[in-house]
Amino acid sequence: MAYFSNAKPGEKVYGLVFGKGKIKEVYPDSHYSLIVEFDNGYEVPYTDEGIPGWGNFNKQTLFYRIDIDLSKEDFSPIDKILSPRKIIRLREKGELEVRLPSGIWKSVKKADPSYVEGLLENQQFHLFRKKAKKSKKKKDKNGKKSKKS
């Protein structure tokens, strides 16, 4: 049974790409079975598993608001604004992240190419950053993983 198999219009949802929204329409016999209208004006189709018809996502990005835990998502502010040359270089290396309309940082490969190009054309360089490095764990003397200090 899919996550949104019993969805009804008007239910409150949260999309990792666009933020808060409501289910606008439900189409049970279609590949994209939901249309969600977000607070920022976007309308996006979703499968009943919560996979959007926007961007390059293959995992669920839409959840009921009561079910979502955003504590693991990165909403941090930007440290410095990148130059256009640096953005191009990081994009070629696969180390560029973009801030999605929900405020979450994701790899530029996940975002819709027209969204990324629109940001670049409008010179909104503050919405790009170098990919954040994850903290590495190393093993202590007993072979257990511990956080690197």
Image: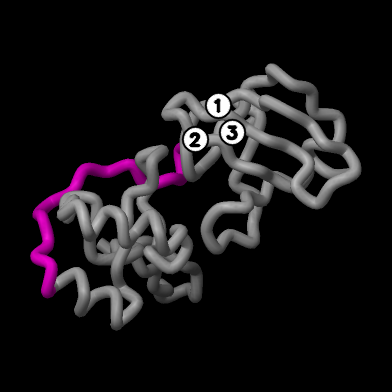
x 57%, y 29%: residue: 37
Q: Between residues 49 and 26, which one lies in front from this camera angle?
A: 26
x 17%, y 50%: residue: 126
Question: Which x, y percent locates residue 149?
Answer: 25, 61
Kind of residue sitting beneath label 3: Ile
| Quadrant occupied by the N terminus | top right
Kind of residue sitting beneath label 2: Tyr
Q: Which residues are magenta?
A: 70-85
Q: Between residues 69 and 12, which one lies in front from this camera angle?
A: 12
x 14%, y 72%: residue: 86
Say whether marks 3 and 1 touch (CB < 8 Å).
no
From the viewer's perspective, is residue 34 above or below residue 13?
A: below
Say whether marks 1 and 2 touch (CB < 8 Å).
yes
Which residue was labeled with disc 1? 21
| Label 3 Cα neighbours within 10 Å, binned few <14 / some 14-19 / many ≥20 | few
Which residue was labeled with disc 2? 42
